[in-house]
Image: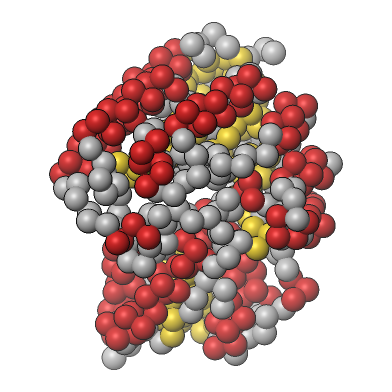
């Protein structure tokens, strides 16, 4: 029995997982709106007739969050608080049959590339003329910018190719058109994302074309910052560094998941690179683009990781002094190459090792931040929270990196605007400052 009146033609989209899912949800929402649906994103009202859940299936914790969310809305449907529940995204792509059997309350499950099919189920049309159009769920001054889908890399631990398919680059002319559309709406920062940015263009142009794409995007009026996420170290296109060095629109920032600091582990992970080659690459990047901020992601507890392997990674992190770092406990994923191995590092030890690395990185981050005190940095302000305006430098991406805090009292900045801020103090992950006369 329905407990309240649901708003007809209202759809609530719930997004879980990474920025690539955020992008996909935004594209889906634009299509829904063009089909005359009223669309909300992660609404707290619970008055939508239809809920679409865009799931993540990357690691155990993400899968559990997705399942919990599906169950929550399946229960809401039973109670009459929702009329229809649809599930899309990575978890649905990977476990569709299992989910259909276990959660029959869901009306339909769709894969990562089945947006036209989902729309058809809603009696809506896939509007090809809208390619590139999105309803942004981020603040209006920045946007995630997906340049390719899927991945051809053979990493042993990763299930992404199972969920996202083979690498497929979006043509440069389409991306430039999308960038111009976003800029016309007030977007100032593009955060380039893909499973692997550095593979961009190989399928279309038979060569790595990321540098060419960046040069074209730099010509788009209104775009002031372009940020690079998820670069693969093996086969890294060095011409990208020249573009970064020579064009101020490219943030001196590179997100390059390196996964481990032991050659033995990197070989087992099928990463196509050694620790020694990784160190050479890092040195070359820092030499070519002085002052660049390097973000990386690591894995602790991969099958066969010994105390010695972990110590080698610890020592490497200590030497490398990454500006930003995250680390995951290894997740044993079905149908990956690593699933053939014994998951022999206990959960307790995995957690202990991730904590040790993060404690080390916290100290490194604190030391690096102290050196910023007295400097004037260009800051893009994202939001107001508590007694502060909160923004980021070119060395920081939203949600995962450092933030700059400016007291509201006695100051005023507009959200989405740039200001030069002189850093007056710093802790492990935040900088505090005042408006600079520079």
Residue found at the very far top of the displayed protein: 374
Q: Quadrant of residue 391?
A: top right
Q: Nearer the viewer, residue 391 or 348?
A: 348
Name the residue rendered at 64%, 58% in the picture.
148
Q: Nearer the viewer, residue 200 or 323?
A: 200
In the rendered image, residue 83, in percent from the top left (x then y), is placed at 40, 86
- The reply to whether residue 251 is visible in this rendering is yes
Identify whether 105 is placed above or below 396: below
Quarter of the image where the N terminus is located: bottom left
Name the residue rendered at 47%, 28% in the picture.
276
In the rendered image, residue 63, in percent from the top left (x then y), is placed at 33, 63
Name the residue rendered at 27%, 82% in the picture.
102
In the rendered image, residue 189, in percent from the top left (x then y), is placed at 67, 42
Q: Quadrant of residue 348?
A: top left
- The reply to whether residue 16 is visible in this rendering is no
Q: Nearer the viewer, residue 272 or 186?
A: 272
**Is residue 258 toward the left or the right of residue 224 in the image?**
left
Q: Quadrant of residue 332?
A: bottom left
């Amino acid at each position: 029995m329905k407990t309240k009146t649901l708003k007809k033609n209202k759809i609530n989209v719930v997004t879980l997982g990474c920025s690539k899912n955020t992008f996909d949800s935004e594209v889906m929402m634009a299509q829904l709106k063009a089909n005359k649906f009223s669309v909300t994103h992660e609404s707290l009202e619970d008055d939508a007739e239809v809920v679409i859940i865009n799931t993540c299936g990357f690691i155990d914790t993400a899968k559990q969050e997705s399942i919990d969310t599906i169950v929550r809305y399946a229960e809401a449907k039973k109670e009459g608080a929702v009329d229809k529940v649809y599930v899309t995204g990575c978890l649905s792509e990977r476990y569709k049959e299992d989910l259909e059997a276990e959660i029959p309350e869901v009306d339909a499950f769709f894969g990562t590339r089945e947006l036209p099919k989902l729309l058809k189920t809603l009696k809506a049309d896939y509007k090809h003329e809208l390619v590139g159009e999105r309803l942004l769920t981020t603040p209006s001054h920045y946007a995630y910018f997906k340049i390719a889908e899927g991945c051809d890399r053979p990493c042993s631990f990763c299930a992404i190719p199972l969920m996202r398919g083979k690498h497929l680059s979006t043509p440069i002319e389409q991306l430039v058109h999308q960038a111009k559309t976003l800029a016309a709406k007030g977007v100032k920062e593009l955060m380039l994302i893909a499973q692997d940015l550095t593979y961009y263009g190989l399928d279309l142009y038979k060569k790595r074309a990321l540098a060419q794409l960046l040069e074209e995007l730099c010509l788009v009026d209104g775009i002031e910052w372009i940020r690079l996420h998820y670069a693969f170290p093996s086969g890294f296109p060095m011409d990208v560094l020249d573009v970064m060095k020579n064009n101020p629109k490219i943030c001196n920032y590179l997100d390059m998941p390196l996964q481990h600091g032991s050659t033995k582990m990197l070989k087992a992970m099928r990463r196509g690179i050694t620790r020694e080659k990784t160190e050479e690459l890092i040195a070359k990047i820092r030499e070519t683009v002085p002052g660049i901020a390097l973000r990386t992601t690591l894995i602790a507890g991969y099958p066969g990781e010994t105390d010695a392997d972990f110590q080698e990674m610890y020592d490497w992190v200590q030497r490398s002094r990454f500006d930003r770092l995250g680390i995951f406990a290894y997740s044993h994923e079905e149908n990956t190459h690593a699933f053939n191995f014994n998951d022999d590092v206990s959960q307790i030890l995995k957690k202990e090792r991730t904590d040790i690395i993060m404690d080390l990185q916290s100290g490194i981050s604190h030391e690096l931040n102290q050196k910023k005190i007295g400097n004037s940095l260009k800051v893009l302000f994202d939001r107001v929270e508590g007694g502060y305006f909160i923004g980021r430098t070119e060395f920081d991406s939203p949600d995962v990196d450092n933030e700059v805090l400016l007291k509201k009292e006695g100051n005023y900045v507009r959200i989405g605007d740039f200001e030069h801020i002189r850093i007056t103090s710093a802790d492990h992950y935040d900088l505090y400052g005042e408006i600079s006369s520079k």
